[in-house]
Image: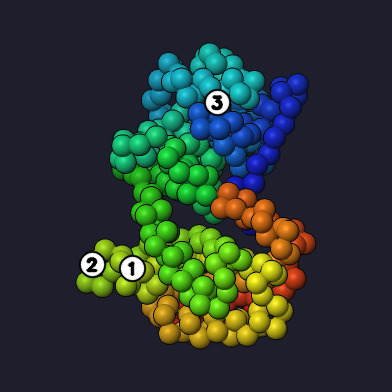
Amino acid sequence: MSRKSKVFWKKAFTVLLAAICILSAAGCVGFGHDTDPATQGSDGDADTGGIQANTDQEDEQVSTELTQRQIDLLEEMGLPTDYDRLTDTQKNAITSIEALLTYLEDKYQEDFCYLSYAEAGALEEEHLEAYPASGTPADVVTVYRTYEDGEYHYEDDYGNIGVKPLYESRVREFVGQSFSESGIKVFSDIRNSGQGTDGQSVTEENVLQTVSAVTYIFISESVCTEEQFQDFTEECAQWMESQCQGVAAQICLRLTDAVQWELIDADGYEDKLREDIFTVEAECAISASGKVTVY
């Protein structure tokens, strides 16, 4: 489920790194994480896993002078930092990553840290995931690139980051009516930041009616019993029906072991979802038509 799961490989396995590990974690300039399966490059050399070639545009003109960011990434993975020594697959991939990051940085005038890259395929568009250097890996921005009429077209969801704190604050306010804030944690994955009524910006008043999101609410056993959790699940469904009309949204509730609850944070909560640390689980969802379902 987590698109931010990190895969780390030892540099001793240089050949294996070149085949499947170009997306290992390396910090802001070393380019984060993700794991796409290894494939074979069109020239017969092993591909670089998550860094895939954009082979649909083989005639794309690229610079043979690598940026420092590209060099840092290649060095981290044990790959040649001489452009001419890279395979065609590696050349196309490292160039695409730089172009997508540059687009984000030029548009928003801030630095971005690399998370993952995927080439265009039968089921998805070419896209890159990154996060603002001023934020955390949880602040994922996805930029898509298509090639039409001889030029590239870009689209991104950076606007989702701005509404995330606002959305979470409204949800946290609701949960705080039932439980102490010292025992609740709220994390939202904004799917669509929407737009306010008559084209106005998203505000505190309309955010629940205009933003589509999946929200995880972790409640510590120190502030909630199983019986209280069941009652709150029904309250949550009623709240969504009254407050979230107009957009599809989902709230996932997790009654959590008190010790494990302390370890949950914005960067790693998705990994925690796979662990056996929850006493009770429930989910409430509302469709764009207003139908509420409890799982």
Visual colour scheme: rainbow
The picture places residue 182, in percent across and down from the top left corner, at: 58, 64
Q: Which residue is mark 1?
A: 204
Label 2 packing within 10 angstroms: few (<14), some (14-19), many (20+): few
Which image quadrant: the C terminus? bottom right
Residue type at the position of mark 3: Leu
For image coordinates 72% across by 58% down, the residue present is 260
Q: Please tell me whether mark 3 sits on a helix, a strand or a loop.
A: helix
Q: Residue 294's spot in the image, x, y percent?
A: 60, 82
Depth check, front residue: 165 or 99: 165
Pointer 3 residue: 73
Residue 199, disc:
2
Between tags 1 and 2, which lies in front? 1
Q: Eyeballing the image, is 90 above or below 80?
A: below
Q: Secondary structure at mark 2?
A: helix
Q: Nearer the viewer, residue 247 or 219?
A: 219
Question: Residue 256, how many percent across, how many down?
Answer: 70, 66
The quarter of the picture where residue 201 lies is bottom left
Residue 223 versus residue 35: which sits nearer the camera? 223
Sequence order check: which comes first, mark 2 or mark 3? 3
Q: Is residue 286 left or right of residue 40?
A: left
Q: Are marks 1 and 2 in contact (CB under 8 Å)?
A: no
> Which is nearer the N-term, disc 1 or disc 2?
2
